[in-house]
Structures are given as structure tokens and as C-alpha cells.
Amino acid sequence: MSAIEQPAPTRPASAPLPDFCSLPVLFALVVVGALTVTLMWLAPGNDGDLRDFCIAVLFTSWLSILLTVALCKLRPWMQRLSWMWPYAAVWLLLVLTVGVSAAALSWVDHNLELGLSPPSRFRFVRDCTLATGLLGAGLLRYFYVVAQWQGRVAATARAQVDALQARIRPHFLFNSMNAVATLIRVDPDAAERTVENLAELFRAALGSDTSTPGTLGEELALVDRYLEIETLRLGDRLRVERDIDVPSDLPLPRLLLQPLVENAIRHGVQPNRGGGTIRLAARTVKGGVTFTIDNPLADTPTTPGTGHGLRNVRERVRLHFGERASADAAARDGRFVVTLFLPETAHARPDRR
């Protein structure tokens, strides 16, 4: 009897390290070092020599910059370690770097007789190493808690976006099939072409890889297919004007613009006897990109919608791009205008789903 093969043990997940190449991390190290020196200078029994205080602040600031550069360069290597070993490696690097730097400074100071360090070399190196070990452990614990909190926030955001996506796609399918049902009675040939277009539309909308973001070009192609379906139903009553001045490879969540175009047709064009014109514009502005979709207001009061499409888009924009993004809607000059603002920093980010 052959031995049953045991599955290979899974490697523990690596604890994510903070981005040591960022200015906030450098600022945190400089501030912690300066505060530590200040507390030691104000402690009882200290002679309060201002010269020693300035030298100590300069020493800790120089160490902070040195440590930030070292951690920035070594972070990819340390991040490959499993479990909590990345943080252990960072702690060891902090202690060793400060210990070696303190020993080098003490040796140079005593040989040149500059009076920059205490008379006892061993005590100076020991105190610097112990202080770094304690402060480094506390600071790394803080970074670890923040990383865990950010991970939970990101997981919650992904779950919310998945829920929103699951709601908008059946909604889109339901409305599209209603359009087909209407055409079957009026124009069977047009209904057949609509079904063919719907097949391509659903392949693009539902068969795509939702783990990665789409692009503006893909989203506009999706909008074109939907407009083609609605044109078969509404004919010349539906008119579209475009003014797109944004690169087509701009990363964009899937099905972000289509619900707004759908709302513009249902509430702005369809109720009007003479139809109307939908305007779709995109502009690069300071700090980001704006999308504008507007439609004429209905001639007569219509049954108000549920607001599902606009609310869904507003929530998805906030979850994908943060609080700086916005989705505003208002009636202006006889038209209903929806304006999306996507911050520039968000364009290069992967989809948070």
C-alpha cells in the first residue's frame, strides 16, 4: 500500500509592513526621536545643557533619516519573510543601526576630544540601544495595529462594493429585458437585433474579470451598446452629444457610467413626447477628472424613481476613490445634471474590489 501523500504545510501569511519610503513614516521617526530626547532633557537630575540637547536632537534626526533610507531599500526583502518575521527584522535593523552608529560616534568623539558624547562609551551605546529597542517595539506595534485596521477597512469596502455590484447588474438586466419585451410587439426584427446586441452587452458587462478595474474606453463601449438598444426602441427621439477629452485608458470601475445614462433616458428622454438630447462629457481638471451626464427634464411630472442607480454610483465612487471623490446631481436650466469628480491620485490605484 502506498503511503498517503500529505499536503505541504502552508506558509504563514506575511504581516504587511508600512511604506517606509513615505514621508509620514520619516516624520514619525523624527518626531519620536525628538520627543524622546526632549523628555530625557527635562527629566529630573539632568543639568539641562542646551548644547547637549541640540546635539542629541541632531543625532536622532540623522539616525531617523538613515533608518528610513535603509528600511525603504530593504523593505521588499523583509516583506518576503513569513508570519511576524518582517517586523522582527525591522526591529533588529533599528537596534543594530543605532548601536553601531552610537559606537562610531563615541569612538570619533573620544579620539578627536570634541565632547559630544558622555565619557563612558559603553554606557552611551547601551543606553542608545535599549532606548531604541523599547521605542522601536512600541512604534512597530503601532504600525502593525494601523496595518490591521487598514486591512479590515479595505475588506469592508470590498464587501460593500461587491454587494453594490451584485445589485446593479440584475437591475440592468431587468431594464434591458423590458426593452426587448416592448420591441417584440412593435418590431420583431428590431427585437431580434436587440437580443443580439444584449448578448454582446452582457458578455462585456457580466463576463468580464471583476477583480481588475476597467477603462474609460471599455465603459464607453458598454454605453454605446446600451444606447444602440435604446435607439432601436426610441428611434429619433433619442439624441446623444459627446465631448470626451480624457484618455481612453483611464482606469474606471465597471458599470459606472452606464447606470447614469440609463437614468437619463428613462427619466429625461422617454417621458418627453419629442424625446431629448443626452450630453456626455469628460474633462481633465485640477486635481482629477470630471464626468458630466445631463438630460432634459420631463415635460410633465413623472413617477419618481427609487434613486437606486444614482445612489449606487455615489456609494461606489466613494468606496473606490475615497472621500475626495463626489457624485452630485441637480436641476439646472431645464436639465438634470449629474457630475462625477474622481481625484487624480485615485486614477493609478487598482480597483479596490
Image (cartoon, rainbow, N blue to C red):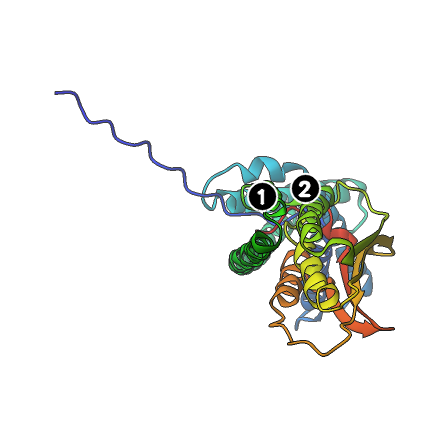
Q: Can residue 154 be seen in this view?
A: no
Disc ID at residue 72: 2
Nearer the observer: mark 2 or 1; the answer is 1
Residue 348 drawn above or below residue 258: above
In front here: 84 or 149?
Answer: 149
Of the two numbered discs 2 and 1 on the same chain, state the one appearing first in sequence.
Answer: 2
Single out the residue that lies furthest toward the left.
1
Q: Classify residue 146 by image quadrant.
A: bottom right
Measured from the top left, where is residue 335 in percent x and y?
82, 69
Q: Relative to the observer, which residue lies in front, 184 or 58?
A: 184
Left or right, residue 104 beside residue 87:
right
The x and y percentages for residue 133 are 56, 52
Quadrant location of residue 200? top right
Left or right of 11 on screen, residue 250: right
54, 74: nearer the viewer? 74
Which residue is pictured at 62% across the width and 40% down the height? 75
Residue 307's place in the image compared with 181, above or below, is below
Residue at image position (74%, 47%) is: 65
- Which residue is at 85% across, 53% downward? 283
Image side of residue 352 versus residue 277, left or right: left
